[in-house]
Image (spheres, rainbow, N blue to C red):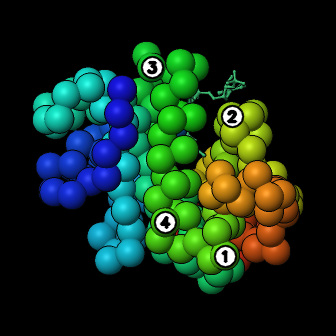
Amino acid sequence: MRVILATEPAHLDAALALRFVVFVGEQGVSPEGERDALDQAPDTVHFLALSGEGPSFDGPGDVVGVGRLLGPRADGHPHIGRVAIARNQRRSGVGRALMDAIEREALARFGEGGAVTVALSAQVQAIPFYEAIGYVIVGEPYLDEGIWHRDGTKVVSHPAADAQGASGIAPSDFARRAPGQRRRRAPRA
Ligand SMILES: CC(C)(COP(=O)(O)OP(=O)(O)OC[C@H]1O[C@@H](n2cnc3c(N)ncnc32)[C@H](O)[C@@H]1OP(=O)(O)O)[C@@H](O)C(=O)NCCC(=O)NCCS
């Protein structure tokens, strides 16, 4: 398994295909809610976890996981979202490897002083996963696309900074609102 950044339209098409299987097909998110303008934003990066080790991209059937990284939002933090692993590949470390690759990219692009705080909107059922990989969940649950979420953050830092004690996990001050209950500040990441 390896993780690549999407660099061509076929990569994004394949990422969307898995997102639609998972979020629309499994979880009931609306198709128009699943694909949004942020997918095409200039500072958005899409990631694909591929089942093979070879250098080539063999099409949608090769994709076992996806996620995207948004540039800093209103809270000042880059956001990770649309994380989905193919159902038959879950609980085998793909999600962890994918998130690690996304976090390293966030650090490379947006890190300051050797660290970056990344933020995400975690489905409540996925919180054990995010906590297992170091996220701190903050704030109240809210509904997005009919699914309960809570916000989470993680401070990602270079290994060298870790050794000096500069790394840590801190809650962030960002917040999102529940559609239908309270007004949202940010779109579903
Ligand atoms: C949530 C999801 C991304 C996790 O991916 P995954 O590949 O199954 O996760 P991993 O195998 O890398 O697990 C990493 C850690 O999280 C833990 N974990 C993962 N899913 C878990 C769950 N549902 N409950 C408890 N722990 C869980 C694993 O045990 C592992 O911890 P460990 O290494 O200490 O054993 C995947 O289940 C998924 O795609 N779900 C459907 C879409 C979704 O909900 N996306 C998140 C939207 S916010």
Helix, strand or loop status at disc 1: loop
Q: Which mark is residue 89?
A: 3
Front tag of 4 and 2: 4
Which quadrant of the frame does ligand 1 lie within? top right
User: Upstream in the sequence, badge 2 or badge 3?
Assistant: 3
Q: Is disc 1's CB within 8 Å of ligand 1?
A: no
Image quarter of the C terminus? bottom right
Q: Is residue 19 left or right of residue 55?
A: right
Q: Position of residue 45 (x, y in %)?
A: 37, 62
User: Upstream in the sequence, badge 4 or badge 2?
Assistant: 4
Helix, strand or loop status at disc 2: helix
Residue at numbered disc 2: 129
Q: Which mark is residue 108?
A: 4
Residue at x-position 19% and y-position 28%: 54
Front tag of 2 and 1: 1
- Distance Cα–Cα, label 4 vs label 1: 11 Å
Residue at numbered disc 1: 113
- Distance Cα–Cα, label 2 vs label 1: 28 Å
Helix, strand or loop status at disc 3: helix
Q: Position of residue 88 (x, y in %)?
A: 43, 16
Residue at x-position 51% and y-position 35%: 97
